[in-house]
Image (spheres, grey):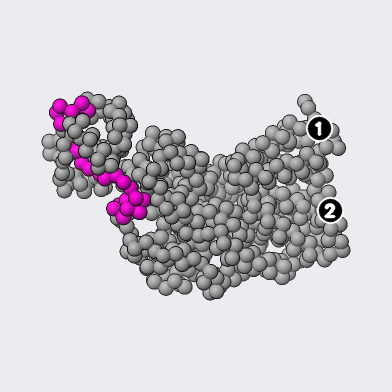
Amino acid sequence: MFSLPDSLHIPFVFGLILAATVMMASNRVRYDMIALLMVLALMLSGILTVSEALAGFGNSVVILIAALLVIGEMLDRTGVARSVGDWILTKGGKSEVRLLALIMLSSAVLSAIMSSTAVVAIFIPVILRIAMQTGLNPSKLLLPMSYAALVSGMLTLIATPPNLVISGELEAKGFAPLGFFSFAPLGLLVLVLSMLYLIGFGRRWLPDQPRNPSQQHYGRSLRDLWEDYRVNRETTPLRVQQESPLCQQPIGTCGLHQNYGVRILEVVRPQRGGSDHFPGPSADFVLHAGDILLVAGQPDLTQRMMQAQHLSPHRLSRRDEQRSIWELGAVSVLIHPNSKLIGHSIVEAGFRSHYGLDVMGLRRNQTAIVEFEQEKLAASDSLLVVGPWSRINKLQAQNHDFVLLESPLEARDVVPAHQRMPIAILITLAMVVASLFNWIPLVATVMIAALASVVTRCLSAQDAYRSIHWSSLVLLAGMLPLADALQKTGGTHLIVDSLLLAVGDASPAMLLTVLFFVTVLLTNILSNTTSAVLMAPIALGVAEAIGVSPYPLAVAVLLAASSAFLTPVASPVVTLVVEPGHYRFSDFAKLGSVMVLMVYAVTLLLVPLLFPW
């Protein structure tokens, strides 16, 4: 097998790190694809053996994160997280200060035991609902909630992947791993300071965007959503006449959408004693004479279709109209920053054939795009989708692609079952207690909890597999060998020696400062996982070189890796709130810079006290 000369190993690894940094910063290549390219490059260059290059996929940290994602899905599916939102609404009243405190505290606590991205995704519609009922501006609530979810990474060992990466690096070097609450006092102080800051002075820096008048009330109707997305189609019930060429024809062969731009949202088939309803009919659904088609289209084109296809206007009975409301729904969803639909149009993505739903509108940067079907989708775009509630619920389960932004008033009664909530809470508490007392290895504890969530039917096995964010796991598994390559080639020692040479005889506190801000920079440009993978071995190498305990520098890197406050693309946790909160880049720069300085102050002053040199 081809192998690079030893003299080129270090330059090659540094070149890979630079290439990965450029590709990640460009946002043109998927992060998981970059990680796989790194694995292949290290393997084919001979720097790592095949088993070494692929070792990341069997790393206990990767397995642990997968199991934690299942736990988060269990808490979501059983309604635990949403119940917290309802509790906030009850206790917070209309006081912005009280609501902010409850939202930030709840977001941090939940994110400490489940995926912070999932918590933010769950809380967005909750906060929008709170804003609608109280008349408050959602922009004042969303970013503090997101920042609190980031701070949660400083509370528990399992809160965020970088913590597990750094603890694993310590264990690999022969040191005791970090405990479940080892650094919790630091995180609690940061949480308190951030709450005081964002509820106090920082609240003035939050944008005060004008509210949509329709948001003054508790919830909006389907018609409100229709107008918000400037949908230029009207829904019309039409009856298929006996002489219509549509009779005995599958919908897919009728060409109604191609010729008239019309979508059939539902078919109502009158029967003796009632009607059968077929929401979101498939392409092979055969139409019969007497069928009532609920179509969405532009009025002039719908009129032309009526004449050409022998369709007559029809008025639904009150009973049929009510049943249509129950079976045919509409929601606003946000495109997740990691969605596979990014870069594809609605047509290219085959949205209707894949999800069985129709896209009726697209909004980008608070502006509705009327001609949207060929528009390439981007992160934080919002879509208005229409179809059967059963398929909408399945769409919401695709939480790696979509985030529920808003449901209309008509959706109030379409809610998930909560009957297994006590079991989910019990499983979570048992996991936390077992982790705290370290009865069995942490990875085994979390795996047992994930398995229990399926065995007790808190979620199905299919939902458990779907909840795992595979691209994030591939990113972590692919980047771990890069740190191994730095160690094996001597690159880590070179970086440590260069750093020590640059700062001279600086104190450990100065080295802690340098490592902290380099990690913050990498976290806000790349990702927190990548920065932890790269910086953890460097921090331990610096500690060894100057003869001090590795824990202060390791914890400094850990806290810095959770400080993704500065840019709207630093983490999905903050990216998700950009569109619903109407935030600009400058909002993150102003508020986030103070957050970073607060974390640094806690790190510099208290880390050496909790973890002596």
Q: Is residue 259 above or below residue 166?
A: above
Residue 225 counted in the magenta span: yes
At numbered mark 1, what does the secondary structure look like: helix, strand or loop? loop
Residue located 61% across and 38% down the image:
33
Q: Residues within 10 Å of mark 2 (few under 14, many from 20)?
A: few
Residue 205 as seen in the image, left or right of residue 94: right
Residue located 16% across and 36% down the image:
312
Q: Write down the residue under mark 1.
A: 4
**Type of the residue with mark 2:** Ser
Q: Is residue 489 above or below residue 95?
A: above
Residue located 35% across and 44% down the image:
360
The mark nearer the N terminus, 2 or 1, is: 1
Q: Which x, y percent locates residue 544?
A: 83, 55
Q: Which residues, given as a range, are shown in magenta? A: 222-247
Q: Which is more toward the observer, 449 or 150? A: 150
Residue 249 counted in the magenta span: no
Q: Write down the residue under mark 2.
A: 498
Q: Which x, y percent locates residue 612?
A: 76, 66
Quadrant location, the N terminus? top right
Disc sitting over residue 340 in the figure:
none
**Type of the residue with mark 1:** Leu
Quadrant location, the C terminus? bottom right
At numbered mark 2, what does the secondary structure look like: helix, strand or loop? helix
The number of discs equals 2
* Residue 187 appears in the picture as rendered: no
